[in-house]
Image (cartoon, rainbow, N blue to C red):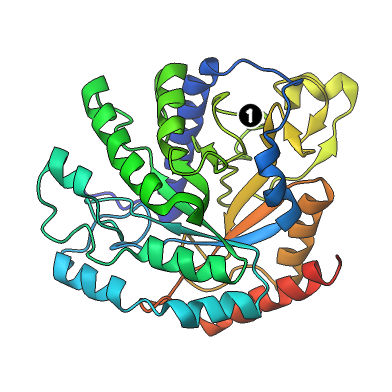
Amino acid sequence: MKRKYSLTLIVFIISILFIQAQNTIVPNWKINPEKELNPNTSWLREAKWGLFAHYMAHRPSAPIPEDMTPAKWNEKVNSFEIKSFANQLTDLSVPYFFITIGQGGGYYCSPNKTYEKHFGPSEGKLSKRDLIANLGTELKSRGIRLCVYLPALGRRDGKEIQQKYREVIKEWSMRWGDLISAWWIDGAVYDSPDVFKAYTEAFKSGNPNAIVAYNVGPVGMNRKQLVPVTEYEDYMAGECDYVLPTSANIPRDLGVHFTVSGDGKYYIGPNISGNQLHFLNFLGEWWGTGNPRFPNELVSAWTQHVIDNKGAVSWDLPLQDNGIIPENYFNQVKELSKRINGSK
């Protein structure tokens, strides 16, 4: 008999695996409540909120569609209307924007000669257009920071392959330079502090002032506050799925049940043992998918709650193939911007 599993069950199972990954990697990090924040994170706290988009050849965490080809991918990347999208961000007073370089199947929205040197011709899966460079140049001219998402390349490979991936990352970082203000690295279950250090150096090779976060799973699935993954990161990845984390001072006699450091400050920033407090959540029904799931009042109020506790929030939303924010999401972000920016 074939069994049909609901999306909710699948998401729950994935979340449990993420938690296990987090518990596995935490020993690489030594709890240090006295560690100072990297001063380069101040812009993120001062920005308070920003936007994030999964612009890829497939839906997030899903397989590559059977009909996807390198030609179709390049057509999509070439159709991205950078000035029109930048106009939207300007109209919305968005301080920063995250975009995915790629996620699965070897499809990336930027060329990379080092990648093809080490792993063979991409046959067009590495786009001919450098969307990241083009977008970064336009946004920088408007005072909007560009940040990037990348999976933890080589996370389950040996040292030789990991070194090759770091060379790939270095080519991107050196080319983009100060066009990139932050890196958000997904699924980063590397097995030693030395590996984290080496990857962080690669990400920052083109811009030492860029900040890095390593994601090992969603927050809010247990009572333990998500803590820094490694001493070599600068801000909390803070992935949220179907839970909105809140901040509070936990009563002293209950603190042991809720925090790792035992200081009783549950998601009160800015400093979470050396990391700037930050959360990433999706406005839709999943990453880059569906219709807005929250009323405007909830989006604004929860964002303000995090800001009041010296954190920042990045909101994921879908983009059309041409890079335009759909009208329903544009209107929701417009209301968010009005409420948050109007309170400055």
Q: How far across and down, in percent of the image, does residue 305 sit? A: 80, 53
In this rendering, position of residue 296 left or right of residue 285 = right
Q: Is residue 290 visible?
A: yes
Q: Look at the numbered disc 1 and give the secondary structure of its residue.
A: loop
Q: Residue at (21%, 63%) from the top-left corner?
A: 65
Tell me the amino acid under the disc marked 1. Answer: Val
In this rendering, position of residue 147 left or right of residue 337 = left
Q: How far across and down, in percent of the image, does residue 101 sit? A: 36, 55
How many marks do you count on the picture?
Answer: 1
Q: Is residue 325 visible?
A: no
Q: How far across and down, in percent of the image, does residue 318 sit? A: 47, 70
Q: Residue at (79%, 58%) from the top-left corner?
A: 304
Based on the displayed image, in which of its 4 quarters is residue 93 positioned?
bottom right
Q: How far across and down, in percent of the image, does residue 178 sit? A: 51, 52
Tag 1 residue: 227
Q: Quadrant of the C terminus?
A: bottom right
Crowding at dot 1, Cα within 10 Å, few <14 / some 14-19 / many 20+, comes out as many
Based on the displayed image, in which of its 4 quarters is residue 262 positioned?
top right
**Above or below, 145 relative to 17:** below
Q: Nearer the viewer, residue 139 or 317?
A: 139
**Above or below, 251 relative to 186:** above
In this rendering, position of residue 119 left or right of residue 58 = left
Q: Nearer the viewer, residue 57 or 41?
A: 41
Q: Nearer the viewer, residue 208 or 217?
A: 208
Based on the displayed image, in which of its 4 quarters is residue 69 positioned?
bottom left
Q: Residue at (74%, 47%) from the top-left corner?
A: 311
